[in-house]
Each structure stands twice: as C-alpha cells, then as structure tokens.
Amino acid sequence: MTENELSKIIVNTAFQIHNKLGPGLLESVYEEIMFYELRNWGLKVERQKAIPVE
C-alpha cells in the first residue's frame, strides 16, 4: 500500500466519523472509533505512541 492510499483511507475514515457523530465529543471518543475503524481496514494501528521531538 502506498503512502497516498494509506492517507486516503485515514482522511476518509476521519471525515466519515465526523459526519456521523458531529463535533463536540471528547477527543478520546473520536480516537477510540478511529482506532476501531482503521483496524477493520486491516491496518496496524498504535494509539498515543510517544515520538521524540528535537
């Protein structure tokens, strides 16, 4: 899968979640649903992964 294909899946999934649920929920709710949906696409997903910032 290319970066463009992966990006398209992520953006479209986020858009669909926002359209169905609307604004105003806690970030943790959107995160949980996004995690679930991306796993259903067969993607390996990690939540709240720490990354080094320089």
Image: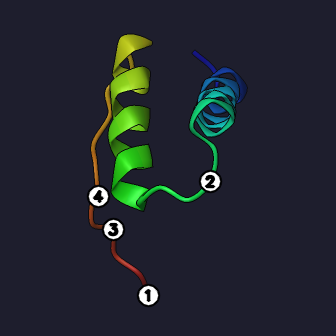
Give the residue at mark 2.
23
Between 10 and 31, which is closer to the camera in this rendering? 31
From the image, tell me which residue sits under label 3. Answer: 51
The residue sitting at 69% across, 27% down in the picture is 12
Work out how far the residue at label 3 is from the one at label 2, CA to CA, in angstroms: 27 Å
Mark 3: give few (<14), some (14-19) or many (20+) Cα within 10 Å: few
Q: CA distance from mark 4 to mark 1?
A: 18 Å
Mark 4: amino acid: Gln
Residue 54: mark = 1
Across and down, in percent, residue 11 comes to 67, 35
Mark 4 or mark 2, which is nearer the start of the sequence?
Answer: 2
Residue 54 position by quadrant: bottom left
Mark 4 or mark 1, whichever is nearer to me: 4
The quarter holding residue 4 reads: top right
Q: Look at mark 4 in the image and give the residue it sits on.
A: 48
Instruction: Judge the density around disc 4: few (<14), some (14-19), many (≥20) Cα neighbours within 10 Å.
Output: few
Q: Position of residue 10 (x, y in %)?
A: 59, 32
Label 3: state its secondary structure: loop
Marks 2 and 4, how far apart in space? 21 Å
Write down the quadrant of residue 50 in the picture: bottom left
